[in-house]
Amino acid sequence: APAAKMAALSGGALWRRGWLPALQFVRRGSKAVTRHWKAMHFQRQKLMAVTEYLAPRPAIPPRCLAPRRERAEEDNGYARLLRRQVEEVFRDNRMIAICQYNSMPGEDVVLMRHYLRKHNIEVKFVLNEIVRPVLSQSKYKNLLPLFVARNILLVSPETKVKEMLRVLKGVPQINLLGACIDNTILSRQGVENFAKLPSLEATQGQTVGALALLPSQTSSLLQRGSAHLTALLDQHIRQLQAGETGTPAEPTPAQSSGSH
Amino acid sequence: KKMASKISVGLRPVKSIVVRFCPFESNVESTRKFLGCINHKKIQATNRNCEVTADVRHDGSEPLVDVMFADGERLIMKGANLTTIEMLTALGSRCSAKELKEEQKSKKKSL
């Protein structure tokens, strides 16, 4: 009977008679919200089909326009901070050594840091993408090819190269690539040679000694002629005195002093 | 495309590896990454007796990887134009081939 009512009358007439739609449409016992997928009412299906989303199409397809260069910089504050730190490191420290870092067990890292800290050498882990732009703008352009794969920096305000080499020898997984000591770029060989040099005071003393050697000889060189003459005359006098007391004076000392 | 760190190499038939490169050159990237991967925990754990040495020079020579195997064979890889993955797979394939041979030999001996 309700189905007949639906078919015969329009929706408005039914509502005016106080007709409740609750369970009267349903004949087979399944509710509105089911656990299985229930087919939509046909009117609803039509409504959904008509109101489907259509994406707006641009007037000119994007492939006809010139490609837009997406600059991946973004320049977030963290990268800026890290770059500033790297610049500070390069400015403050006299010795900067660059080593390749192959993965090491954690305790070894801590031990190595400890030993290096005793000699006032700090270990810094750096990211290549941050260090590269800093270096390319500073005067250290020749250090650029070193920053590939994982690296660490050993920085120190003093140049204790011997101790550093000793510590690094005990750690096989860290390989020294190069160093910048007192604004001089050195390779590994250069670093080893630098370690073999005597200390600065000793070298300065050696230079001063070598330079002072020649002037110290100048005065004796200038006086050599007259000193030689004085010595010869003294010898002559002694021989004369010896000759007076002993045998008579010989003519040879007079001849030798005359030939000079 | 595999990640270089995912390739596992069993280093048991290897006696020593020498990696030589000149860090101021521009073609050393793959060799340096190869060295880094070789020193990983997992690969080092397969053979504790294998010595990995890094030779850092400054004479402009090209990057070189010299592998000495336990049965006297030698593998030299010139890394100037090779990628890390190629070097690792080459080494890995040779190592697994040698391990297979050893297993077969030991099976024959036990038989």
Image (cartoon, coloured by chain):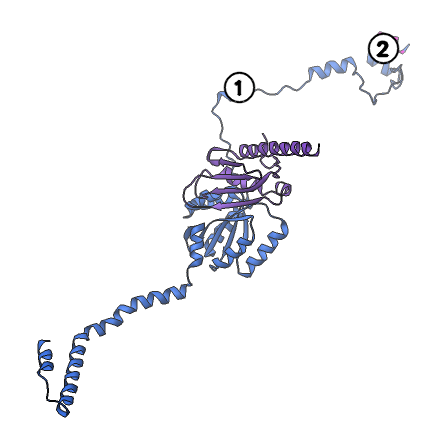
Residue B53 shown left or right of residue A216 in the figure: right
User: Magenta residues, as a range?
Assistant: A2-9
Quick check: can you spot residue A81?
no
* CB under 8 Å between discs 2 and 1: no
Residue at image point 15% right, 89% down: A241
Label 2 marks a residue whose chain is A
Task: Say if labels 2 and 1 share a chain.
Answer: yes
Q: Which hue belongs to chain B?
A: purple
**Quarter occupied by residue A136:** top left
Q: CA distance from mark 2 to mark 1?
A: 48 Å
Could you tell me the amino acid type at mark 1? Ala
Question: In the image, is B25 to the left or to the right of B48?
Answer: left
Rendered view: A61 above or below A158: above
Q: Mark 1, chain letter?
A: A
Judge from the rendering whether residue B106 lies leftward or rightward of residue B61; answer left or right.
right
> Outermost residue toward the right?
A1
Q: Is residue A5 magenta?
A: yes
Which residue is identified by label 1? A59
Give the letter of the blue chain. A
Badge 1 element: loop
Q: Position of residue A89 (x, y in %)?
A: 49, 53
| Place of residue A111 in the rendered image (x, y in percent of width and height, measured from the top left) | 60, 55
Q: Mark 2, mark 1: which one is toward the viewer?
A: 1
* Quarter in which the C terminus of chain B is drawn: top right
Identify residue type, mark 2: Met
Circle number at residue A6 = 2
Mark 2 closeness class: few <14, some 14–19, many ≥20 residues within 10 Å: few
Q: Quadrant of the N terminus of chain B?
A: top right
Residue A158 lies, in percent from the top left, at: 47, 60
